[in-house]
Amino acid sequence: MKTRAMNRDWIATAATLSSALPYLQRYDGAIVVIKLGGHAMGSDDAMESFARDVVLLRQVGVNPVVVHGGGPMINAMLDKLQIRSDFVGGKRVTDAATVEVVEMVLSGVVNKRIVQAINGQGGRAVGLSGKDANLMVCDQADAALGFVGTPAQMNPRLLHDLFTNDVIPVIAPLGAGRNGETLNVNGDTAAGAIAAALKADRLLLLTDVSGVKNAAGEVVTELKAGQIREMTRDGTIAGGMIPKTETALDALHGGVRAAVILDGRAPNAVLLELFTEHGAGSIIRPD
């Protein structure tokens, strides 16, 4: 009985691989930017699973780019160092002391954890920030927020060089200011700007919700940009979903073919979205 059950499992695995062929062909050579939120990083097991999925993407010819956040880790380190962190309009005020901690946590602890996880699964990952090779040159977003930046000039040549050499970029959302200062950039905003600069096929925003929900609380699996704007105007899209959908719309406007908001805590969420008919989360396309 055990052998029969194992045979059924192997047959199911083979059938799954066979059904994925059209999608593997569809994404061969495609650029996929994946935003991994701090809340979606989860346990070591979850990180290992995510890393395996990213390595699989590269193995089948996709060019993945991982852009990560790290808000919970930054908060924990600021608390540990007893550095007060204020917020204006829901955004962190980043003074000189805070931006040092942000860079230490994002470019150090968080970035290297992801790089190590991908390399541990047989991939070739390199950790970067938007400061490297002037990938992301930023203007100060708002004087009241301090060292917080908005992407103004993108230079993705380094990323194309890494693709050529089968290297997976893992990018911390920090930008270079006009005068060489370090600027903290919202992770979703950074991912959207990088995806647009690369004219990516997909921008995947991995978060801790299952997707964009309608007024009845049901996840809408396919949306046009105009529907997103209308749902925002009537209040259906509200709170923390607004900046994510705004990032998606900006990316589409910049030339990204489609953006997807999905639950990064779900096992194999990236593979389900790209390589199955059903997909995962909410896909947003241009009008």
Image (tube, grey):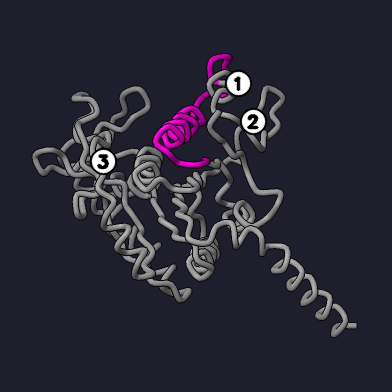
In the rendered view, does 196 fall on the left or right side of 224? left
Residue occupying the point 68% across, 55% down: 276
The residue that disc 1 covers is 236
Name the secondary structure under disc 2.
loop
Residue at 29% from the left image edge and 39% from the top image edge: 185
Earlier residue among tags 2 and 3: 3
Query: Does 233 appear above or below 17?
Result: above
For disc 3, the marked residue is: 184
Give the class, few, some or many, for how many residues have Cα within 10 Å of label 3's Cα (few <14, many ≥20): many
| SS for dot 1 | loop
Crowd rating for badge 1 (residues with CA inside 10 Å; few <14, some 14–19, many 20+): some
Residues at discs 3 and 1 in contact (Cβ within 8 Å): no
Asked if disc 2 and disc 3 are in contact, CB closer than 8 Å, the reply is: no
Q: Position of residue 11 (x, y in %)?
A: 80, 75
Is 241 part of what is drawn in magenta?
yes
Side (left or right) of 119 relative to 18: left
For the record, the magenta segment spans 232-258
Q: Are marks 2 and 1 in contact (CB under 8 Å)?
A: yes
- Residue labelled with disc 2: 213
Alpha-carbon distance for marks 2 and 3?
30 Å
